[in-house]
Amino acid sequence: MGVDVLTFGCRLNIHESEVIRRDAAAAGLSDTAIFNTCAVTGEAVRQARQAIRKLRRERPDTHIVVTGCAAQTEAETFSAMPEVDRVVGNEEKLKPETWTRQEKIAVGDIMAAKEIALPVIDTIEGYTRAFVQVQNGCDHRCTFCIIPYGRGNSRSMSMDDVVSQVRKLVTSGYREVVLTGVDITSYGSNLPGAPKLGKLVKQILNAVPELERLRLSSIDLVEADADLLDALGEEARLMPHLHLSLQSGDDLILKRMKRRHLRADAIAFCDQVRRLRPDVVFGGDIIAGFPTETEEMFTRSLDLVAECGLTHLHVFPFSARPGTPAARMPQVSGGVIKERARRLREKGDEALRRHLDGEVGRRRRVLTEMGGIGRTEHFTQVKLPAPTARGLMLDLSFAGHDGRQLIVA
């Protein structure tokens, strides 16, 4: 057999896994499994280690390589696993020559990385939507986050390179492209003239008129620039769905997280975007049980779901990452964290059901994906009548929903 790339975590990893797959195959590797890992939570690292052990039991002769953020931040941990043959860092994994060598540990200083030089790809295996990396790394130091130490400082792809990548994918048949990165609203800070994300979005839409849908991954609301807001209001091909990095609804917790917005900023931003794009749908990341969080503080996060009008909620039970300031703060008990995460998820389920109720009887454009599902412009999941080929853009009406997915009339 050839090369298997098993991807964990974010959309950034999805794009990079395609580059890894191509370079590893070109290097002539065979019977090789490459784990492209995530380090955002301790649970993500645990799941990667569990998957590595499972694969070794099932395929004892396969060469196992571990890369990604967990490999970058915990290289010694993974190299000490008897199941692992090689550990490769986040910067090294994207260099073709890495896959022609065989040193046990190839993990360099990620903080020294200054630019992105990704090759253009024309397909992303197994995905109907294409993910395009426009930025990597992060210059901020949220107290709970290990990712800057896995990804390095913020650096961006040039606008010309991004446009070339999008054009290539559209020519290959992709109808929707998702711009992704670690902190995409910091886009352009290291480029000549410091162009911002909004300028990039407008350039893509102008330069690639064949692109039917452009979508953004998670954004930091305080970095949203005027051009980006203008594009949301004026460009129908920029999807009316924003996923916000909120993390908490309490101002003191936000300060202890070292976030750069307050509760009022989040509510005001959502109100502003709704005035520009009345049909916009918001998602959001919220952490349950951050150190020192009281019940009153947590209630403000619960209330934020309604006050911001969130629909798609990503709930993260707090997970202390060694080496981060939050790991040294007074911790909330595990049982309380679990219970608060459950309540947040229930609040998110209620919000999603209200959104789905409002979609019954409407007609939307749906991009069909694998597994008998599709997505509307608002990223709402649709259960498709079987069998339906993937990659189609269909006008569909909805007769009901099951609490998670719309059901086609």
Image (spheres, grey):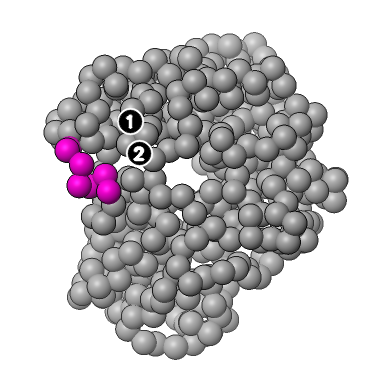
Determine which residue is flagged by label 2.
257
Which numbered tag is attached to residue 79? none
Determine which residue is flagged by label 1.
253
Mark 2 Cα within 10 Å, few/some/many (few <14, many 20+)? many
Does 403 appear above or below 174? above
* 117 or 348: nearer the viewer: 117
Q: Using the rendered image of the protein, determine whether residue 387 is visible from the camera's viewpoint.
A: no
- Residue 148 in the image, given as x and y percentages of width and height: 42, 57
As drawn, is 284 to the left or to the right of 251?
A: right
Residue at image location 48% in from the left, 82% down from the top: 98
* 264 or 86: nearer the viewer: 264
Quarter-wise, where is residue 316 in the image?
top left
Q: Using the rendered image of the protein, determine whether residue 203 is visible from the camera's viewpoint.
A: yes
Dot 1 falls on a residue whose secondary structure is helix
Residue at image location 22% in from the left, 23% down from the top: 294
Does 170 appear above or below 20? above
- Residue 204 in the image, given as x and y percentages of width and height: 78, 49
Identity of the amino acid at label 2?
Answer: Met
Quarter-wise, where is residue 226 in the image?
top right
- Residue 84 in the image, given as x and y percentages of width and height: 28, 74
- Residue 80 in the image, given as x and y percentages of width and height: 20, 74
Mark 1 Cα within 10 Å, few/some/many (few <14, many 20+)? many
Q: Which residues are magenta?
A: 325-331
Quick check: is 327 in the magenta stretch? yes
Identity of the amino acid at label 1?
Answer: Ile
Residues at marks 1 and 2 touching, judged by CB atoms closer than 8 Å:
yes
**C-alpha separation, residue under disc 1 versus residue under disc 2:** 6 Å
Quick check: is 46 in the magenta stretch? no
